[in-house]
Structures are given as structure tokens and as C-alpha cells.
Amino acid sequence: MMPSDIIGLYGRSHMSLLRRDVMGLIAGVVAAPGFIISAGAQSRANAYGFSFDQPGGRRLALSAYRGRPILIVNTATQCGFAGQFATLQQLWQRYSGRGLMLIAVPSNDFGGQEPLEGQAIAEAALQNYGATYAFAEKCSVRGSNAHPFYRWAAAQRPAETPSWNFHKYLVGRDGELVGGFSSGTDPIGPQLVRAIGQELQAT
């Protein structure tokens, strides 16, 4: 993405945060701690063996979306990439009717940029960016304390793990991990849209 595109997408007021986040991305790639994958997570046949807790005690089981592509994004409300809450909403509005499921997974792992807790995170994303898709409880997405889905995904795609906020995992209609997309990947850009479209057309 060109600098002019970023300015147009997020506004000049976010540019200082974006510069800090880009530096964090570089540091994360160089110095991110190794993932410790449990034998149980490795043995899961596909993503349908996992679920996410939600605020209020609800549980979001990925098996409930069997046969549908699922996009899972680790988010942070104070991140310079937080404008992606809005573009994720655009993606959700465009493809949810065709079967896409979108889950935001708040995390404080990168830069301490998610100070909120529980339902307050989803409320902030709704008020500031119009986000109406599903939100999980805040959790870790890297290291030995990572959510089991993220440990499984790291075992499946070790070169495509999160190194900053707004990393995107796409799970295919068969429950297999299609791939990971970096924080800078535009949610409505051609790379991710093409991958989602291929899954929506799969039989």
C-alpha cells in the first residue's frame, strides 16, 4: 500500500500512530518470541475443534460455521491500524450474506494497544467505526499463553503468524487454514477479497 493510500484510508491524524506501528511490526518480525504448540492443538484435524469465549459468558464455536469461510482478526482499539475496524465492516457487509463469518479477537500482545476489557471493546469499535461483527473476549494470540486456535494456526502456518495487530487468518469452507495475511493487508483489497471469493465459490 502506498503512503498516499494509507493517508486516504485512515486520515492524517492516524499517521503518527501508523509510523509507530510499522516500527513495531519490524521489531515483532525480528524479535517475536517463539510459539510453543501443545500436542493437543497440533492434533486438531481442523479449525472446527476450537471456540472463542465472548463477553457475557457466551461461546463462539467455529464448528457452528462449518461449510463457511471464517476470517479471524486480532484487533486493538488503540492501534494505528484501527481504521481497519471500518474496512472490516465493509467486508462483512459485502460478504456476510454470501456466507462469510468474521470474528474480531481483541489482544493486548502488541504494543499494549488494547486497554479496554470485555464488552467495552466491541462498543468502542461500534461507536467509532460502525463494527457490527462478532467479538471474542480479549486473549493472547502468540506465545505459550496464546489461545488454542492461534497455537494450532501457528503450527499449520509457522511463516504466517501474527507479528502485530490486525493480522488476519482465513479458514476455508472445509475448516482448513487457507493462510495468514499481514496487518497491512487491506481488508477490502484484492489479495484478501480474492481469497475469500475463492472460498465462497468452492463446492
Image (cartoon, helix red, strand yellow):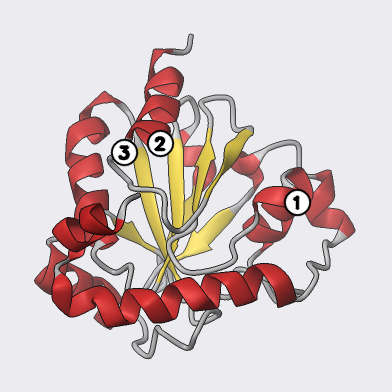
CA gap, disc 2 to disc 3? 6 Å
User: How many numbered markers are drawn?
Assistant: 3
Any mark on residue 192, and which? Answer: 2
Which element carries disc 2, helix, strand or loop?
helix
Is residue 45 placed above or below 88 in the rendered structure?
A: above
Q: Identify the mark at residue 158; answer none if there is no mark.
A: 1
Q: Which mark sits nearer the N-terminus, 2 or 1?
A: 1
Place of residue 76 in the rendered image (x, y in percent of width and height, measured from the top left): 38, 75
Expressed as whole percent of the image width and height from the top left, the position of residue 156 reads 75, 44
Do the numbered discs 2 and 3 sit on residues whose CB atoms are within 8 Å?
yes
Query: The residue under label 1 is which amino acid type?
Result: Pro
Tell me the CA gap for discs 2 and 1. Answer: 19 Å
Q: How many neighbours does mark 1 have within 10 angstroms: few (below 14), some (14-19), or many (20 or more)?
A: some
**Res 189 label:** 3
Residue at 52% in and 69% down: 164
Q: Amino acid at mark 3?
A: Gly
Is residue 42 left or right of 61 when viewed as pictured?
right
